[in-house]
Amino acid sequence: MKHEPIVSVVVAVHNMKGHIRQCIDSVLSQSLQELELVLVDDVSTDGTADILREYAEKDKRVILVWQTENGGAQLARNAGIAVSSGRYITTLDHDDFLAYNALACAVDTFRKHEGLQCVCFREIRFLPDGTFLEHEEKNSFGLISGEEAYRRSISWTGITGRMIVTRELQMQYPFDNCERVYGEDNTAQLQFLASPLVASCQGIYYHRLLDTSLSHKVSLNNIRGNIRFINMKRQLKAHGYSNEILILNETAFWASIVSSYYYYHRHRLCFSQAEQQEALHLIKYMREQIDTTLLAPSTRWRPGYWKMSSWNLFRLQEVIYFLLRWLIKKDNKALE
């Protein structure tokens, strides 16, 4: 008789021939063997699909899903989750990998705390030069409330988004595809808020940083990604969260807009003329979506963070703000 797996690991895969074997091997060699691995090919063209077929032929725990259009990781993950059957669900990026006992540690943590719905892995970053980096404050918070987990996730300090959740929680909050690269942050934050408690465990998730990663190179994605806050606001309102939670989201959104303009100002020469115009259009659009009544007063009146009465005044403010910041930093270094 076939038993349901304890854990479903879902991997959205696209053109990752160089690292996908390590990713898959790290799952299939877990000390916890009662698992299924759902591999969702998001229209790979580099031979990755052949590797996925190879593993499916060798191990009956591997399930293959084929996307007909390249829709990005969030849609691929949702497609994989739809065919999964595990009691707990986690996603693994196609270039990342797990320590051999990561899933066992997570499941053990669930069993120790009745009613627990969300467990965060211990995240260690694997850098391009082959070294490892761990931000320990993110990995050992123990047991905290879901609201506290959400507060920490606003700036992703003191917590990591590498997590495993119950099937019920995952089905309630599927992956948010409002933004292709960073929409997953919304999903993690909503899952935190819906969890009475969130725990950390010692199971290690190795996050590989690639120079070619969409989130780690100079790209419009680093500006476009902040659109996710708009959809997050809609969802927070739809689920009836308090004004205090809305203020946290809106304040983070406004800070991201100022940071986006700084990113544009700093890297604009790396963009084509068309990309520069798109960047400005995106920032202007996001600025127009800000509800100043939902901004924390300490942010609303902070120099460099005034919404201003017009787009041109806002741009002038930012250039002056960045210049003053640079001059102050320069003077401080001269005094050292």
Image (spheres, grey):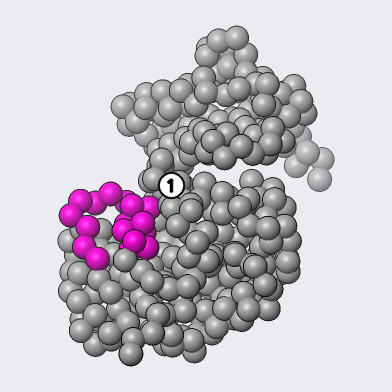
Rendered-image quadrant of the C terminus: top right
Rendered-image quadrant of the N terminus: bottom left
Q: Secondary structure at mark 1?
A: loop
Nearer to me, 154 or 148: 148
Q: How many marks?
A: 1
Q: Amino acid at mark 1?
A: Asp
Give residue 73's quadrant in the image. bottom left
Horizontal arrangement in the rendering, residue 225 relative to residue 11 (left or right): right
Q: Where's residue 105, x and y in %?
A: 59, 81
Is any atom of residue 129 visible in this view? no
Horizontal arrangement in the rendering, residue 66 relative to residue 75 (left or right): left
Magenta segment: 65-82
Q: Where's residue 242, x and y in %?
A: 68, 36
Badge 1 is on which residue? Answer: 176
Q: Residue furthest front?
A: 1
Examine the structure image and report whether residue 74 is included in the region drawn in magenta: yes
Horizontal arrangement in the rendering, residue 72 relative to residue 130 (left or right): left
Image height of 258 relative to 207, above or below: above
Is any atom of residue 210 visible in this view? yes
Label 1: few (<14), some or many (≥20) within 10 Å?
many
Image height of 242 relative to 203, above or below: above
| Residue at image coords 44%, 88% | 33
| Residue at image coords 31%, 66% | 83
Image height of 195 relative to 221, above or below: below
| Residue at image coords 64%, 46% | 154
| Residue at image coords 57%, 78% | 107
Nearer to me, 153 or 272: 153
Examine the structure image and report whether residue 107 is included in the region drawn in magenta: no
Q: Where's residue 136, x and y in %?
A: 69, 68
